Amino acid sequence: MKTLWLVRHARAESLSPKGLDKDRRLTTEGLGQATRLAHLLSTENVKVDRMLISAATRTQETADILLHVLKEGVKSYQVLEDLYLAPADSIWQLIKSSEPQTDSIMVVGHNPGLEVLARAFVPALDGLPTSGLVEIKFDVQNWSDASAASVASTRCV
């Protein structure tokens, strides 16, 4: 069984001081959203083998909160430039190329890519809000075999 969590960054400011989208920081509301999500996952004793994080400031701040609360529950993490505003197919290729011994992956990224990818497995998904999470469990041994046909369960938070 493989577990995938798709996490959209928490609420961010509309403009960064430099005017660059990539530099947008979390708002006070966003900090609260990310903290609540982190504590929810902590109470569920979530274990993440690999966390993939977009290089944007808002995604890194969201991930930092998750990492702080989940502590040793996250084995490894990577900040990837390729995840910044990545389309669904690029995100999916990163996931499918993961090593078979990696049982759980969390992607902290952006819409529309995350939402489009989530809808491939949860067609009834009604949007992915800031700090939203979609959990997908695949009944496979290798990520390369994961597909909509191998979905064992899903959950949206």
Image: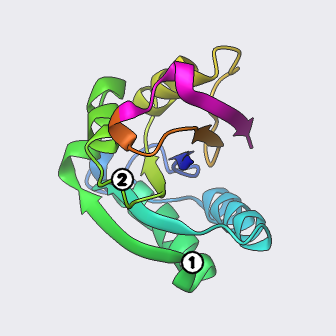
Determine the residue positioned at 29% across, 55% down.
99
The part of the image, by quadrant, that contains residue 156 is: top right
Kindly identify the residue that appears in the image at 66 percent across and 33 percent down. Answer: 152
Whichever of labels 2 and 1 marks the residue nearer the N terminus, that label is: 2
What amino acid does circle 1 point to? Gly
Residue 103 position within the rendered picture, expressed as x and y whole percent measured from the top left:
48, 57
Quadrant in which the C terminus appears: top right
Per the image, the residue denoted by label 1 is: 73
Q: Residue at x 72, y 72 (%)?
A: 45
Image vertical order of residue 7 relative to residue 40, above or below:
above
Question: What is the x, y in percent for residue 120?
Answer: 52, 18
The amino acid on which the numbered mark 2 sits, given as a three-letter code, is: Ser
- Residue furthest out toward the bottom: 72
Q: Is residue 139 magenta?
A: no
Label 2 sits on a secondary structure element that is: loop
Relative height, residue 150 to residue 8 (above, below): above
For the residue carrying disc 1, how many other residues have a C-alpha within 10 Å: few (<14), some (14-19), or many (20+)?
Answer: some
Q: Is residue 113 left or right of residue 34?
A: left
Residue 113 visible, this orientation: yes
Q: How is the image coloured?
A: rainbow
Secondary structure under the numbered disc 1 in the rendered image: helix
Name the residue rendered at 56%, 38% in the picture: 138
Q: Which residue lies under the disc numbered 2? A: 16
Identify whether 154 is placed above or below 130.
above
Separation of residues labelled 2 and 1 (CA atoms): 32 Å
Q: Residue furthest top?
A: 123
**In the image shown, does 15 or 84 lie closer to the viewer?**
84
Task: Pick the residue in front: 147 or 8.
Answer: 147
